[in-house]
Image (cartoon, rainbow, N blue to C red):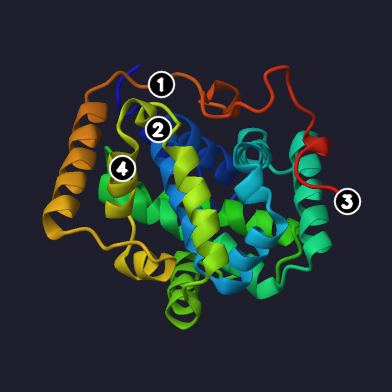
Amino acid sequence: MDRSAWLRRIAALDPAVPDEAEEIHRITAGIEFPWDVRQALGLALFRTYAVPSIGELLARTGEFTAHTQKRYDDTVLLLGATVERGLDDPDARTAIRRMNQMHRRYGITNDDMLYVLATFVVTPLRWLDAFGWRPLHPHERVAAVAHYRALGRRMGIRDLPADEAGFAALMDRVEAERFRHTEGGRRVADATLALMATFPPFSRLPVPLVRRGTACLMDPHLLRALGYAVPTRAERLAALAGMRLRARIERRMRPRTAMVTVDDLPEVRSYPAGFDLARLGTFG
């Protein structure tokens, strides 16, 4: 199997057809760029903490501060079911039902859910534009939007943008208008950053280096909202050079022949004996 085989498959599929859009997104997120997409979605979580209504709610529940590993794992497992199996698979429907139950419990507004969804669309695409080992095919961009629009509809989210430009404009507008430092948002960010420092390969590095390296990948306005120091130009250039070196190495590696699933992730550690999607998340 040559390095461009999956790209040819993506080019042959039609992202306007729902089943084919789902296949494209599975290839992008699970085969071609699994590590990159996970890192980008991790950074997307930090963006949500800088919106006061979201960061303060997460701090009040204590889930992301007292039970950070479990809360992270539950998020990864629930979202993973929607990508790995397709949105109409019974397991995916169970995962979406659990997400909807939790959102109703906390009375999360449509505006906040729409913003979070926008970060899941836009942040990975911008990350891959900057650090991906190959350029994205236009079908991959359309398929990512199609996947999250379909997920948003199943979650009852209203006023969904029609395309990537719409999601990007929404995300940028919300951040310009609403990003603000709060103690709760900072506590949740600190807990998430501490957890990320335990994930391989970062666990082999000094924690301060992991924290500083992660900060180098965050936008300055996000860092200011979270109360983190903005890295120096030299630090940021070094981090960017490291990410681009990684992309060059990946470009020369043999292609994956199967999807990387959540069961393959060493950072998901809460359920060594297995898990029930219907029992993930918070109750009560």
Nearest the viewer among 3 and 274 is 274
Q: Is residue 91 left or right of residue 268?
A: right
Under circle 2, the secondary element is helix
Label at residue 208 = 4
Mark yes or no: residue 18 visible.
no
Nearest the viewer among 165 and 276 is 276
Residue 75, located in which quarter of the rendered image? top right
C-beta proximity under 8 Å, tags 4 and 1: no
Label at residue 74 = none
Query: Mark 3 sits on what residue?
Result: 284
- Of marks 4 and 1, the one in the foreground: 4
Where is residue 104? Give x, y as percent.
82, 62
Q: Which amino acid, mark 1?
A: Arg
Identified at 44% across, 18% down, the residue is: 257
Identified at 83% across, 37% down, the residue is: 278
Nearest the viewer among 97 and 71 is 71
Q: Which amino acid, mark 3?
A: Gly
Mark yes or no: residue 108 visible.
yes
| Gap between marks 2 and 4 measured at Cα | 30 Å
Q: Residues within 10 Å of mark 2 (few under 14, many from 20)?
A: many
First along the sequence among labels 4 and 1 = 4
| Gap between marks 2 and 3 measured at Cα | 39 Å
Identified at 55% across, 69% down, the residue is: 162
Q: Which amino acid, mark 2?
A: Glu
Query: Mark 2 sits on what residue?
Result: 32
- Of marks 2 and 4, the one in the foreground: 4
Residue most extreme to the bottom: 177
